[in-house]
Image: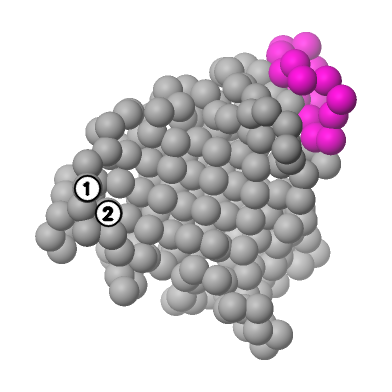
Amino acid sequence: MRFPALISFFVLCCGLASGCSEGVGRKVEATVLSVHGSVVFGIDEQTDFRPVGPESRLRDGSTVRTLDGAWLNLALLPGAMLRLSSNSEIKIEELKISKDGNETGDAMRSRMARIRLSRGKITVLFTRRGRIGSLFALRTPSVTITADSDCLGKIYASPGAQPAIAIGAGYFQKWPSDRPETIAAADDPEAQIDVVNSLEIGDQLRELQSGWQNRRPFYRGLF
């Protein structure tokens, strides 16, 4: 299974600030930014899957599937967005913020998103928001990828029981792999294409986020 596009884009967009103070933790629901084609979701392992639309409430425990030729642009949290590509499946394991009062801007203390990719491909945009502590964790059948408030431009990928691998800007890794060294994207034509495609998707996600914020609150469903 190969994840160079995902890893390269994380590295380009990370640069997270360290430091995190306590606040009131609240679970949130993801926001559907746009849907193309047939995308369905179910909650807590139920078999009754239903179409994903703008008002779908995707919370902890939601499994989301894209069918052939479909994709989904999703905002998990402020500054944490993804595109789920065709013939892919994710499970939202945890979406949580810690904040002061009832505001969601400067009052936010921390963000946490945990996602499991069962099959297919996702591209993730995870950006810094001031000094807010942040964590994004992605699990796949072969590797766990984590970006947190202390990553400072790097991500850490833990393939199974192997030691974590630090992946710097401009590098990527393949799994499964018998070599621990990361690979320079400049030395791999396919990886260069992946990086360019990921940057294009990132620009689209930013544009969708901006348009959504102009119409309604960025996310909803504190519970």
Inspect the magenta stretch and tell me whether residue 182 lies in it: yes
Query: Dividing the picture into quarters, in which one does residue 115 lie?
Result: bottom right
Residue count near mark 1 (Cα–Cα under 10 Å), binned few <14, some 14–19, many ≥20? few
- Residue 11 numbered mark, or none: none
In space, the residues marked 1 and 2 are separated at their CA atoms by 7 Å
In the picture shown, does residue 63 fall above or below 187?
below
Q: Position of residue 18 (x, y in %)?
A: 32, 29
Query: Residue beneath label 1, please?
Result: 22
Range shown magenta:
174-194
**Residue 131 vs residue 112: left or right?**
left
Tell me how the rendering is colored.
one colour
Residue count near mark 2 (Cα–Cα under 10 Å), binned few <14, some 14–19, many ≥20? many
Q: Are marks 1 and 2 in contact (CB under 8 Å)?
A: yes
Circle nearer the N terminus (1, 2): 1
Residue 187 in sight: yes
In the picture shown, does residue 154 fall above or below 59?
above
SS state under label 1: loop
User: In the image, what residue occupies the spot 22% across and 41% down?
Assistant: 21
Query: Dividing the picture into quarters, in which one does residue 50 lie?
Result: bottom right
For the residue pair 132 and 160, the one nearer the viewer reads as 160
Query: Dividing the picture into quarters, in which one does residue 159 lie?
Result: top right
**Amino acid type, callout 1:** Glu
For the residue pair 170 and 218, the one nearer the viewer reads as 170
User: In the image, what residue occupies the spot 55% across and 38% down?
Assistant: 146
Query: Residue beneath label 2, please?
Result: 98
